[in-house]
Image (cartoon, rainbow, N blue to C red):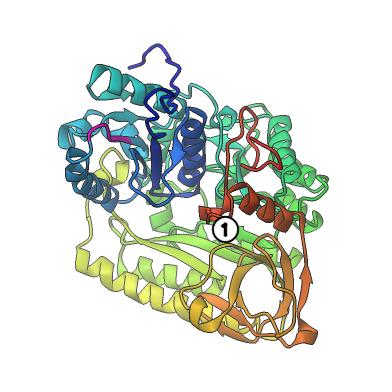
Amino acid sequence: MSFTPLTATVEPDEQTHAPQRTYEVRTFGCQMNVHDSERIAGLLEDAGYADAAGGQADVVVFNTCAVRENADNKLYGNLGMLASVKDARPGMQIAVGGCLAQKDRETILRKAPWVDAVFGTHNIGALPALLERARHNDEAQLEILESLDVFPSTLPTKRDSVYSGWVSISVGCNNTCTFCIVPSLRGKEKDRRPGEILAEIEALVADGAIEVTLLGQNVNSYGVEFGDRGAFAKLLRACGDIEGLERVRFTSPHPAAFTDDVIDAMAETPNVAPQLHMPLQSGSDRVLKAMRRSYRSEKFLGILDRVRARMPHASISTDIIVGFPGETEEDFQETLRVVEQSRFATAFTFQYSKRPGTPAADLPDQLPKAVVQERYERLTELQDRICGEENAAQIGRQVEVLVTAQQGRKAHETHRLSGRARDQRLVHFSVPDGAEQPRPGDLVIVAVTQAAPFHLIADPQAADYRLRRSRAGDAWDRAQADSCGAPAPGSGTGVSLGMPSLPLRTAST
């Protein structure tokens, strides 16, 4: 269903001095959802709302995921907890968007009738108008479109970080994996033109960002819509020509469509990070066929071999599903074999969950929970060992770390800062006595002194510590000045209009 768009603006009442309405966005799911939440925040600020910054918000927006079974439980649990809060706060509104909203639609309003607005993956831009209409009409508003209305990258954006940013190159997916509900919720793949993507990246860099991550459900099929199967490799090389852009990442590719021209572009473009996320899903060829993953384990391992031949120090991560319907112990052993051979730096492991609307949900031989759990534990034990061994091999290496605002759980005890190496490994590091402290966005070169399965530690001597103050660090300083010293989550402040840029200006945004 669709409605005529409204213009929604919420401002303090000049006569009554009513406070500005505030918002909070709660995000579940993948990087695409995180990126969409930046658009949601930008839209709300453009409409006159202010970030609740940890306080009780007048508008709470849930940006949901539908991939995992507990996504439903998580959403309805959160909505249930907010019901009494809303009862006690007249005028408070709740909105639900994202993949679960696209899938469940009226179900959300039936299960949680205190929700004010439900919107889908194709019409994020409708949210402010839906909220205003719900207030005006005093009834819930539902708007779900079946195809993309406006490409999300044209919407106002509040970036979560001043030193790095997400850049969407496509939305939707043309694959038909039997376990995945995303294509039915995000639609067929739609590609942005290279010039639009590069213009957005240049805008980010002009505002201080030194790292971008290119996003798509299947980035290496980028260009199929406009007839250029080599478009993704060309896009990577074009990123190499953007002055001031120091790190380029992308996620996620599909092994079936991953070609050597992309490997060449990665190896030959200096600012493309030596890091690759390559979803395996299963090491069993029989299970891969049942999943409709149009590659087999030999092809997958061959891709890793070619990547490492060109980039010996590349870190490779993956996704793996345990307990797909009909998976036998022999199938699972094949997954363990491929994992051992692949030597992943990290792996995101999932227990298969039945998702209504996917072909796999109707397959016979759904496995008992106890069997899936036991296999999952064996897989994670193996991968944790490999992670530890691969990280231990980094001890003694010098790594360049992009300092982040997020710190480790023990930072108050250890006094270490945190950041990401070029290969995306998490590094906790100390600053030698007397050395200059880095800012988020600055770069340091440190020698790795310890390793754990999920992070590296660098406690360098003064001679082994080098700091490079960056434009991104300068951007961080400006963001702190613009927020009058108040802590800002992720360092983002302000909103950009039209072509998205970092939420940051030396004057006003």
Image quarter where the N terminus lies is top left
Q: Residue furthest front?
A: 15
**In terms of image quadrants, where is residue 215?**
top right
In the structure shown, which secondary structural element does the residue marked by tag 1 occupy?
strand
Q: Note whether residue 213 is visible.
A: no
Q: Name above or below for residue 62 compared with residue 340.
A: above
Q: Note whether residue 296 is visible.
A: yes
Q: Is residue 476 left or right of residue 117?
A: right
Q: Tag 1: Cα neighbours inside 10 Å, few (<14), some, or many (≥20)?
A: many
Identity, as a three-letter code, of the amino acid under mark 1: His
Magenta stretch, residue numbers: 90-95
> Can you give x and y, in whole percent of width and height, for residue 6 in the image?
42, 15
Q: What residue appears at the point 30 percent right and 29 percent down from the top-left corner?
A: 117
> Can you give x and y, in whole percent of width and height, for residue 54 in the image?
40, 52
Q: What residue appears at the point 81 percent right and 56 percent down from the top-left corner?
A: 268
Q: Is residue 291 left or right of residue 432?
A: left
> Can you give x and y, in whole percent of width and height, for residue 484 in the image?
59, 51
**In terms of image quadrants, where is residue 446?**
bottom right
Image quarter where the C terminus lies is top right
Taking depth in this image into account, of 93 and 311 the one nearest to the observer is 93
Q: Residue furthest top?
A: 4
Q: Name above or below for residue 361 compared with residue 153.
A: below
Q: What residue appears at the point 61 percent right and 68 percent down from the top-left corner?
A: 419
Taking depth in this image into account, of 443 and 296 the one nearest to the observer is 443
> Can you give x and y, in whole percent of width and height, for residue 270 in the image?
80, 57
Q: What residue appears at the point 61 percent right and 34 percent down from the top-left corner?
A: 496
Q: Which residue is mark 1?
A: 277
Is residue 156 rendered magenta in the image? no
